[in-house]
Amino acid sequence: MADALADVRRVALRRGDAGAAPRVEAVAEPFLYGSPVGRRYLAMAPARALAIGDPPERCPAAGLGGDAATVAGAQAAAGQALRQCLAAVGGRAGCGCRLMALDDMLLAGPLAFTYAPGVGGRLVGDGAGGRGAPLTVAERATDDPARTLIGFFDAAGPVAVGEVDDGGGARLVLTPSGALFEGARERRGWRRGRIMERLLLSDADGRRIIALIGFEPADIAAEGAALAAWPRG
C-alpha cells in the first residue's frame, strides 16, 4: 500500500504543477457510470479514490475514499480506499488491492473499466420449481451504498428479484409466486465489472435455491454439478 500511496502523491503533485492538465473523463468509463460502486464514486466530491481487489478475477472487493481537494487529501482518500478494499478482501489468499481511479484520473487500462449491464444467471435447486434455464441478471444501485438490487430475467420478463448486501447477505423473491428465499453470498471475483458469485438461499420450509450470477456457459461446462451443489457442513 505504501508504494500505491507514493504513486498517488507523485500524480497529485504533477497535477498541481501542471495547472490545467489534460482531463480524463472518468464519467465516460462503463464501470464507473454503470456499476453501483462506480456510481457511488462519481457521486463523491474530490478528493476521491476507488480501489478494487487484485487480481480482480479472484478477489471480489472494492473500496472508496474521500477527503479534501488537496495533495494531502488525495493521499488520504487513496489510503482510505485501499484500507476499505483490503478489509473487504479479508484473509483471502493471494489477494491484494489496487487503485483504479483518483478524482478524474484513471490509474488502470481501459479493459479494467469494462462493465456488463447484463450477465448470465441460473436458478437451481429444489426451490427453483424446475427452473435452471439460462437467464440474464441485471443490477441496480440503491440509496443505501451497502445494498444492490438484482433481477433475474428470461425472455418474458422477471423470474426473480431481490438484493445483495456488502455484508454477505442475499434475498430473492420468485415471481409470480412471491416465495422468499434468504441466505448468503459466495463471491468468486470480478468479471466484466460484475461480481461472479453464487447465492446460497433457503425459504421458511427448508427448500433451497442456488442462484448463479456471472457464470458463462464455459464455466458451467467446466464445473458442472459442483456449481449446483450446496456446501458441505
Image: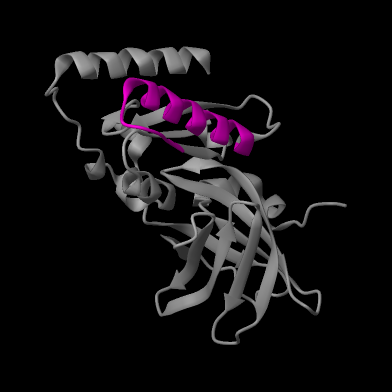
Please provide the residue range marked out in magenta: 65-88
Residue 127 in the figure: left or right of residue 220: right
Quadrant of res 94: top right
Residue 136, how many percent across, how many down?
44, 64
Q: Name the side, left or right, on which 231 lies relative to 74.
A: right
Q: Is residue 8 above or below residue 220?
A: above
Q: Quadrant of residue 101?
A: top left
Q: How is the image coloured?
A: one colour
**Residue drawn at 14 percent across, 22 percent down:** 21
Along the viewing direction, whichever of 229 and 45 lies nearer the viewer: 45
Q: Is residue 70 above or below residue 135?
A: above
Q: Is 184 part of what is drawn in magenta? A: no
The residue lying furthest to the right in this view is 233
Identify the main secondary structure in magenta. helix
Residue in the foreground of this view, choosing between 159 and 140? 140
- Is residue 66 shown in magenta? yes
Identity of the residue drawn at 31% across and 25% down: 70
Q: Is residue 213 visible?
A: yes
Q: Position of residue 44 (x, y in %)?
A: 35, 45
